[in-house]
Image (cartoon, helix red, strand yellow):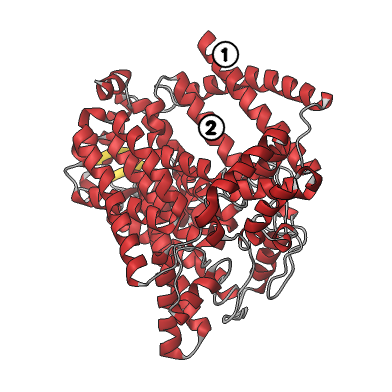
Amino acid sequence: MIRNKILGYIFGILFSAAMVTGYQLETYDHLTLSSISGILVFIGLSLIIGTLAPFGWKYLDRIYDKEGGRLSKKDIDSSNTKADTAPVGDDSRQAKSGLKAKVSGFLAYFDRVSDKKYWFTIWIILIAMQIPVMLAEFPGFFCYDAQDELNQVLTRTFSTHHPLVHVLLLGGNIALGHKLTGSWNVGICFHLTMQMLFMTGVFAYALTFLRKNIAVKCGEGTYNNGIVLYKGKKIYRVLAVLFFGMFPTIVMYTLCSTKDGLFSTFLLLLVIELMKLLMDTENFFKFKRHIFLLIFSAMMMSLLRHNGFYAYIVFIPFGVFALRRYYKKVLILFIIPVVLSMVIESGLTAALDADSSEHQEMITVSIMQLARTWRYTPEDFSEEDKEVLLSFLSERALGTYEIRAADYMKSFFNNAEYDENSGAYWKLWAKMMVSHPMTYINAWFLTCYPYWYPFAVINPYRGHQMPHFTYEDSSYFEYEVEPPGERHTLAFGFIDKLYYKMSLTPFQQKTPVVSLVFSMGFYFWVWMYFAFYTITKRKLIVCLPLMPVFLTWLTLMLGPVALIRYMLILWYITPLMPVFFRQLLTIKREDVNEQRS
């Protein structure tokens, strides 16, 4: 189809632009748009990817068509008959012996167990998978902003720089553990254990949802005590459990004090509930549990990260439009989390007398752009321009400019001056933008290109000194236990060495093929390819549950630094991709048109 070919080339152009710009920023620390080799690579890669993309979509059609992706009615009837006429474990299973029989019997349990027991069993398995890492990294990873958040609670001096809900949660748990035992390590471990129990519970919920939507229900067999028997996709379901329970990037943040793990977990829960809402909008409102989980997950997503609130606000009109047949119910459902989060945030700010005067998080990109312009062309600033610039950013602050991280410099920003004279700031910013457009583009893209470039080595903090190490070749993860905590490897020392290597050396980021599964950019383009596939099927509505994820990704384009922790959700949602494919097939064209009516 001509339409698919056009979509293929659009995808090819976008992908090629990301690859070329990402390579230049990674290699040269700036864009070279006039490079002949870059232009030729862009054109050639666009043609190649644009030509191949539709063939990939055709392959997906073959996998998920009536013959390959779903059982026919005859197959289902046949399975039901087998389920009703033969007890689980009969015939061929009885012929098996030894280890193979035990493994087969163990896996068969997960086919016939109820959803509640399945969730609980998977939850226990995921918890067990975290224990070796916790013992190797005791008391867990206490890092990033954790020390500052704990100090706010201990000194009773609060700021909205970090979400107050998380400040109170983290600081309260750690202070409680310390008060009861006299050990900061126990307090930190207590907090991270509570966090781990919640996160693995949500992961188990996602895996239960996965089983329910990709395995085939074979009926309520006589020998199954009336419980639905699930058939198929065993290997994939096992791999999904192992992925959630053992993949290093996920485990790192399950046992890490940063708010981003919890944020992405609530975002995962929101995606699942939005999928349920899309699958059966009318019946969704009959289940109070699903209504509560959607409201709670959206509210917590908004409370745990400021950009999460903005992403959710932007999502609301799109969600209401997509489900406009039920627009009254959907609008109320989507608005409640906004109201609750605003009331809670403003209430905590007032009750704790928290300082809310900071602006630098909102204008990070502009700060970096002015600083880069000053670094490379200070002579282009007149005396008046220099005076204005230095009133917001001192020479000491401008001297801390780092091309991939705004953390140090933004901390020096004069918020009081901005409150009184923001007009002068933006006037200077606009003036420099007109005369230095490429400087502005480079300053902006250097803080966010790893989100779209699969081969980026995450290392924005090179040279930064931490309490127990100095960043050198990689900033993939902050392998640290900041004071008042102290790391003790209680067992499994090889795990500690592995996590140290993955965090502070680039070995997994530079290993061919392996590097991709550790890359934000790779997962982003996998999901973009799927989104284009839904467009070829004229069913883009299937991507509605992914919109909060995409909008969160967009907000990070204006962030201070590109780090794995900000887009953990890309790892969390990937095991659910088969559910999206199945939903793509079960939603009929007439259903999409009905939603629009």
Secondary structure, mark 2, is helix
Viewport quadrant of the C terminus: top left
Q: Is residue 222 left or right of residue 444?
A: left
Residue denoted by label 2:
528
Nearer to us in this view, 281 or 385: 385
Q: Looking at the picture, which amino acid does disc 2 mark?
A: Met
25 vs 324: above or below: below
Q: Position of residue 586 (x, y in %)?
A: 33, 27
On the image, which quarter does residue 279 sit in? top left
On the image, which quarter does residue 417 sit in? bottom right
Nearer to us in this view, 50 or 584: 50
Q: Position of residue 447 (x, y in %)?
A: 65, 47
Secondary structure, mark 1, is helix
Q: Looking at the picture, which amino acid does disc 1 mark?
A: Lys
Nearer to us in this view, 202 or 79: 202
For label 1, count other residues whose C-alpha is less than 10 Å away and answer few (under 14), some (14-19) or many (20+): some
**What count of labels does the image hold?**
2
Nearer to us in this view, 292 or 555: 555
**Gap in angstroms between the C-alphas marked 1 and 2:** 16 Å
Would residue 221 be seen by someone viewing this image from the given angle?
Answer: yes
For label 2, count other residues whose C-alpha is less than 10 Å away and answer few (under 14), some (14-19) or many (20+): some
Residue denoted by label 1:
5
On the image, which quarter does residue 179 sit in? bottom left
Q: Position of residue 416 (x, y in %)?
A: 53, 61
Q: Tell me which residue sits at (44%, 90%) in the image.
A: 181
Q: Position of residue 46 (x, y in %)?
A: 68, 21
